Every structure is written in structure tokens, then in C-alpha cells.
Image (cartoon, grey):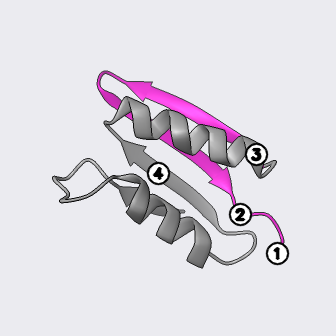
Amino acid sequence: MKTIDTCVPLPYSPLIPAMKAILTAESGEKMEIIMNDASAFGDLKEYLSEQNIGFREIYEQKIMKLQFTIPDK
């Protein structure tokens, strides 16, 4: 499983490394995106839903995770 942790301080939106990872992933690749920004987390969930990509949400205190598999392209 490829893990992208966007909780580290970034000079830009945490959506940028998350989307880069999603768009460059191979079909069938399992991914986990870790965030601590509730707004970006909501935007990412909305994007995945619009793309018909099912996901699992995990909440651990202030950390939020999305786990999903990249569909066939």
C-alpha cells in the first residue's frame, strides 16, 4: 500500500501531494492518504466519490485517513 502523509508542514494545500499521488498511481494500486486538514479531507472524499472510487475512512484523534484502490484506467 502506498502511503501519502500530508500532515507534515507544507507551503501549499495538502491536496496537491494527494492528487499527484492519485493521478500518477497505477491501476489496482492500493493507496492511503493521511491528512490533518478537515477541509482538504472533505474535498478529497468528494473527488473520490465523483470518480466512483470507493474508500474507507479512518479517524484517529486529529488524523484522518482514506484508503482506496485505484480503478482500471
Image vertical order of residue 12 relative to residue 41, above or below: below
Mark 3 or mark 1, earlier in chain: 3
| Tag 4 residue | 33
**Quadrant (top left/top right/bottom left/bottom right) for the N terminus:** bottom right
Q: Quote the CA–CA distance across marks 4 and 2.
A: 12 Å
Residue located farthest toward the top when viewing the structure as drawn: 61
Give the mark, 4 or 3, whose residue is nearer the N terminus: 4
Q: Which SS does the magenta portion mostly show? A: strand
Cα distance between the residues tagged 1 and 4: 20 Å
* Residue at mark 1 to residue at mark 2: CA–CA distance: 8 Å
Q: Which residue is mark 1?
A: 73
Name the residue rendered at 82%, 75% in the picture. Answer: 73
| Amino acid type at image mark 4 | Ile
User: Which one is in front, 46 or 59?
Assistant: 46
Disc 4 is placed on an element classified as strand
User: Disc 3 residue type?
Assistant: Glu
